[in-house]
Amino acid sequence: MKIDADDYQVRESQPVDLKKWPTAVKAVYKSDKQYRKLLAEHVQQLSDLQQLLYAANQYSILLIFQAMDAAGKDGAIQHVMSGVNPQGCQVYSFKHPSAEELQHDFLWRTTRNLPERGRIGIFNRSYYEEVLIVRVHAELLRTEGVPGGSEGRKIWKTRFQSIRNLEEHLYRNGTRVVKFFLHLSKEEQRRRFLERIDAPSKNWKFSLADIEERQYWKQYAEAYEDCLQATSTKHSPWFVVPADDKRNARLIVSQVVVNALSALKLAYPEATPQRRRELKILRARLAE
């Protein structure tokens, strides 16, 4: 079954109702063996394209992952990027802001870690937390020292605009931003939480806070809907990835990343006449 990334892309200004976006779709693989084969093919393509990206040194890629707890962000990053040269890839996870970070604007702590040209940057959570968790838990906004304090929906609209401006600036300067919302059902999250409790090797992944956040499911859904509609653009699209099947989600994510890199039409730099002469001399010396 072919993966059509367009099926998961949020169009610019498209109204988003997450109840109409599936958390599970027909699997693109028919067996464990086929899944491993498809993922390996995607990983090899990514490895080849990342090498081209690094050699061309003109563009960078920023992959953003957002989701409810237990949606599989870590696993998707681990499996999809498993074949990429670590020298050309940077992964950052953003938790609660530090005291220093709270003294700056909400974009400061993440923009410090944007990928250099030739590299792939991965944000496991990102500046989007500032229009998601901070919106659901409005008390967090008071710790940020925002001028004028909270102004209802106006502050979220201004933050959406700041994000759009940032991502448009990045696009103009060669950074392609691709954003994934791993769309998990509440029932599947419950099942995964129980697995984390029952499996000793996964106990460390689970805390009381995870349970408490479930009571805000509706509020998070509303925050995500507004966010996806306001910030998915032609140049920096959101992809809503059905996440109830982790393997399917990884294949969809990897296909989208392959598409994003392929669209850059990268090529290895051509050697200048001077460089070709140098190489000819060096080859002659090695032949002695």
Image (cartoon, rainbow, N blue to C red):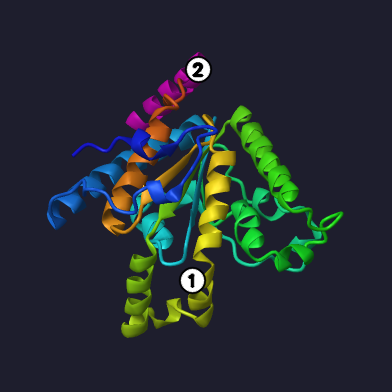
**Amino acid marked by disc 1:** Arg
At x 29%, y 53%, the residue is 24
Find residue 20 and report its horizontal and vertical position in percent.
Answer: 39, 46
Region of the chain picked out in magenta, as a range: 271-288
Find residue 40 and report its horizontal and vertical position in percent.
Answer: 24, 48
Which residue ends up furthest to the top in the rendered image? 273
Q: Earlier in the sequence, mark 2 or mark 1?
A: 1
- The answer to if 138 sits in the magenta stretch is no
Q: CA distance from mark 2 to mark 1?
A: 59 Å
Q: Please, what secondary structure does the residue beneath circle 1 have?
A: helix
At x 43%, y 24%, the residue is 279
* Dominant secondary structure (helix, strand or loop) of the stretch shown in magenta: helix
In the rendered image, which residue does mark 2 sit on?
Answer: 272
In the rendered image, which residue does mark 1 sit on?
Answer: 214
Badge number at residue 147 = none
Find residue 276 and report its horizontal and vertical position in percent.
Answer: 45, 19
- Asked if residue 84 can be seen in this view, the reply is no
**Amino acid marked by disc 2:** Thr
Q: Residues within 10 Å of mark 1 (few under 14, many from 20)?
A: some
Q: As drawn, is 225 to the left or to the right of 45? A: right
